[in-house]
Image (cartoon, helix red, strand yellow):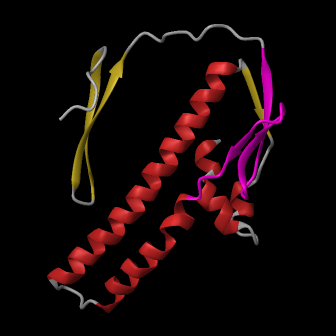
Amino acid sequence: KLHRPLEGKIKTATVKREGEHWYIIFITEVDPKPLPPSEEAIGIDLGTNPHFLVTSEGEMVEAPRHFQKAEEKLAKAQRELSRKKKGKSGRKKARLKVAKLHRKIANQRRDFHHKVARKLVNRYGTIVHEDLNVQALSRSHIAKGVQDAGWAQFL
């Protein structure tokens, strides 16, 4: 089932499996639609709690905390998985449940990032962000918040 009609000429197709789901990813060649020119510029400062980002104009975007919200469900599913015997069908089902939860969190985070980025790109011609060493921050005392926010994916 296509989730949207294909536009342009198909260049490649890739078959991908995520858990129980199979996907075909089409890469097509289309003529880009230019955005209306904008001379406006904005700076963004990324954060973890309670704001995902703050703009230089003072606009604040709340951090959705997808992982934090699903943490209890995920911990329970992982505990159930750890109690199952290797090679049994119950373990396979438990493993799929854990994978499904991780996939859901990743999809929610990706969707949030796309929506925020699209909103910024539509409004501003130039977007400036701080030079963050996300890898080093993900080993600090705020690591869980940094990884839940998904800074590396957003930037």
Q: Position of residue 27 (x, y in %)?
A: 33, 27
User: Which residue does the image show at 58% across and 47% down from the upper left?
Assistant: 153
Question: Does the stretch in magenta take in 52?
Answer: yes
Task: Specify the quadrant that holds the N terminus.
Answer: top left
- Please tell me whether residue 136 is drawn above or below residue 17 in the rendered image: below
Numbered label tally: 0
Question: Observer-nearest residue: 153 or 10?
Answer: 153
- Please tell me whether residue 8 is drawn above or below residue 25 in the rendered image: above
User: Which residue does the image show at 50% across and 71% down from the upper left?
Assistant: 71
User: Which residue does the image show at 48% across and 42% down from the upper left?
Assistant: 111
Q: Is residue 69 left or right of residue 8?
A: right
Q: Position of residue 18 (x, y in %)?
A: 29, 55
Question: Does the stretch in magenta take in 36?
Answer: no
Q: Write down the quadrant of residue 130 in the picture.
A: top right
Q: Position of residue 50 (x, y in %)?
A: 72, 56
The magenta region covers 40-65
Task: Specify the quadrant that holds the C terminus.
Answer: top right
Q: Position of residue 93 (x, y in %)?
A: 22, 75
Q: Write down the quadrant of residue 6 in the picture.
A: top left
User: Which residue does the image show at 69% across and 67% down from the upper left?
Assistant: 143
Q: Is residue 126 left or right of residue 58?
A: left
